[in-house]
Image (cartoon, helix red, strand yellow):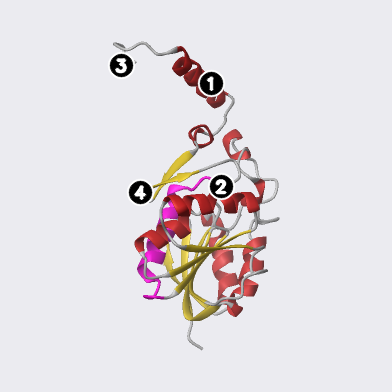
Amino acid sequence: MAHNDRELTKQELMAFQALVRGRGSRKPLVHLTGKREFYGLELQITPDVLTPRAETEKMAEWAIKYAPKGSNLLDMGTGSGALAITIAKHRPDLKVFASEVSPAALKVAEHNATKQAVNIKFIQSDLWQHISAHFETVVTNLPYLEDGAELMPEVQKEPAVALFGGKDGLGLYRRFLKGLPDHLKPVGYLFTESDPWQHEALIKEAKRYHLKLIEQDYFILGFQLAKE
């Protein structure tokens, strides 16, 4: 309609109608376009990865701010690679690692890292299973929805492995925090994402591992390992 001086070709019209049908069936727009902007970067998104949310950009912002110069950083459960790639792009001094349990998601993340020309070490791992390194900073957006939570039709088309975190949504975070002390260096940083109503429980759980709260946003929490 913005260019009514030019008639669409048959192929263009068919492609447009296919997009309209897909959206009409509540297919996520990002799955139709195959891409999403995150922190100013264009990333490939497929049904194998969670669509990066604008709220998660706060986690990238804090990691870029706090990560010590020349240190190691891990993005656990990287999905599309949005966090790891953004941090690596803005902090080229860091050695960035990214882990993911899903092989299909890992391929998307590797593609995005290549496209953005950043050097990231990718690891296929179920939480800490295949991770041996130590880090000054860890960022993670683990699944935190309650099992059986009612979802909008678009969200139902996201990968379930990236959405659900157990009965109260924090099951994976508890497993993650249990293994964190073996990998987070003294006075290291942790940044997480969860629903606001889960923050109290997550902060309490983090305290068990000597993590003190240093930042809090609507969805994002920032911790630092307290000196012993």
Q: Which mark sits nearer the N-terminus, 3 or 2?
A: 3
Q: Judge left or right: residue 224 versus residue 148.
A: left
Mark 3 or mark 4, which is nearer the start of the sequence?
3
In this picture, residue 122 sits left or right of residue 41: right
Q: Amino acid at mark 3?
A: His
Does residue 217 appear in this view? Answer: no
Residue 9 vs residue 76, the one in the foreground: 9
Query: Does 158 lie within the magenta span?
Result: no
Q: Residues within 10 Å of mark 3 (few under 14, many from 20)?
A: few
Residue located beneath label 3 in the image: 3
User: Height in image: 11 above or below 205?
Assistant: above
The numbered dot on residue 50 is 2
The number of numbered discs placed on residues in the rendered structure image is 4
Residue at (52% x, 54% y) in the render: 110
Q: Residue at x 55, y 49 (%)?
A: 108
Please tell me how crowded label 1 is: few (under 14), some (14-19), or many (20+) other residues with Cα within 10 Å. few
Residue type for callout 1: Ala
- Name the residue that disc number 1 marks: 18
Q: What x and y, as percent, mark residue 220?
A: 47, 59
Q: Which residues are magenta?
A: 50-70
Label 3 element class: loop
State the separation of the CA atoms marked 2 and 4.
18 Å
The circle drawn on residue 40 is 4
Q: What residue is rendered at 39% in x and 75% in y? A: 70
SS class of the residue under badge 2? Answer: loop
Instruction: State which tag comes first along the sequence, 1 or 3.
Output: 3
